Structure formats: structure tokens, C-alpha cells
Amino acid sequence: INLTRLDESPAELGPGTRDLIADSLALAEQCARELRTLSYLLHPPLLDELGLGAALRQYVNGFAQRSGIRVDLNVPVGVGCLSQDVATTLFRLVQESLTNIHKHSGSQTAAVRLARRGERLTLEVKDEGRGIPSERLRVSDEQLAAFGVGITGMRERVRQLGGQLEIKSDRQGTTVTAILPFPEGQA
């Protein structure tokens, strides 16, 4: 607000000062946008309000616009009511997987599928990119942490819910699959 008032003031400012004020205003606006995005990503309000399907649709649409990657999303209506922990974990897995696709794969497409099979909930995120080097997939969680917290964090979140995370990758792309227990009574 002070920058805007200063920028709009009729006072005579030194050479380049208006440019500095304009740059500072632009930077402040960018920071505010990024903080709103970060706040949303930490806990998307739609997850609580409308459920996982709507939150994923909104996130995937925004991701596709920002990245230029076309994402095919398939979240059937009949998946059932998910606990907050399960919904948040699945949302985070999609988020991290799509971020990795954007940063590392070179793929122009991605597919996100959520399905219920008996007492298991399966999330699959695929791309058609360059794949992850096999030596990187064979390392321990401790060694993976050296590359960043993404894959390790995904594995740990799934493990805490009694599930398993599998990553398959070759030169035709990568598939991240999370399988979580989903007892019949939760539907």
C-alpha cells in the first residue's frame, strides 16, 4: 500500500526512483501471488469443501495451464468417501508426481488415474518422458534423500497409511503407482 501511495504521489522523486518503485510493486505483487499459491498447495480448501475429485480437477487444470503439459485425469465418482489423511496423501502424490514430470521428464502429456479395486485404492500417474535412470531407482531411501525429498516423502506418506509406492521407469516414461488399503466400510 505504501509503495502504491508513493508511486502515485505528485512529489518530485530522484532519477530512477519511479522505476525502482514500479519494480518493487511488481515484486510485491508476485510475492503475494506465490504466497496464495503456496497456501493453497499446503492444504487446498477444495479438498475439505468438495472432496478429492474436485480438488484434483482444479489443481490439474492449473498445472496444465502453467506447464503446457496435457493431463488426462480419471477420478471416478464411485471411489467413496476418503479420510482427510488419505485424500491429502493422494493429492500430494499427484502434486509431486506432476511436478517431477514437469521438471525432469520432458513429456508433453501425463495421465492420472484413481481406482478402487476391492479393498484397495490405486493411484497411478504416468508420463511419456525420458524416464528415471535405473540406478537412481535402485538406491535406498537415505540415498534418495540426497536427490531431494520428493520420492522419499511420497514413499513415507504412503507407508504411514499402510500402503506401498512403486515407481517403474524406462525410456518410454515413468509410472508412479500408490496402493492404499481401503476397507469396504469406508465407502
Image (cartoon, rainbow, N blue to C red):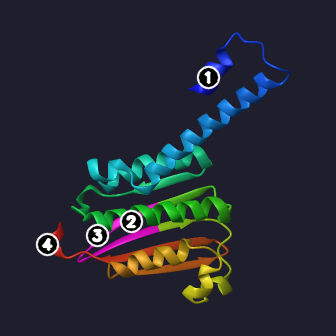
Q: Is 9 left, or right, of 119 in this rendering?
A: right
- Label 1 is placed on what type of residue? Thr
> Overall secondary structure of the magenta stretch?
strand
Residue 159 point in image, percent of width and height: 39, 81
Q: Amino acid at mark 3?
A: Arg
Residue farthest right in this picture = 15
Find residue 53 and report its image quarter.
bottom left
The span picked out in magenta is 112-124
Q: Are marks 2 and 1 in contact (CB under 8 Å)?
A: no
Of the residues tagged 2 and 3, which is closer to the observer?
2
2 or 3: tag closer to the N-terminus: 2
Pointer 2 residue:
90
User: Residue at label 1?
Assistant: 4
Left or right: 164 as drawn, with respect to 168: left
**What's under tag 4, amino acid-wise?**
Gly
Give the residue number, with chain letter if any, for mark 4: 185
Q: Secondary structure at mark 3?
A: strand
Q: CA distance from mark 4 to mark 2?
A: 19 Å
- Sequence-wise first label, 4 or 3: 3
Would residue 54 be visible to someone looking at this image? no
Quarter holding the C terminus is bottom left
Identify the disc placed on residue 116: 3
Camera-side residue of 145 and 78? 145
The residue positioned 61% from the left and 73% from the top of the image is: 148
Label 2 – label 1 distance at C-alpha: 41 Å
State the image coordinates of residue 152 (x, y, percent, origin top left): 52, 78
Identified at 28% across, 63% down, the residue is: 84
In reply to whether residue 116 is colored magenta, the answer given is yes
Count neighbours of disc 4 (C-alpha within 10 A) and say few if under 14, some if 14 to 19, many if 20 or more.
few
The label on residue 46 is: none
141 or 10, nearer to the observer: 10
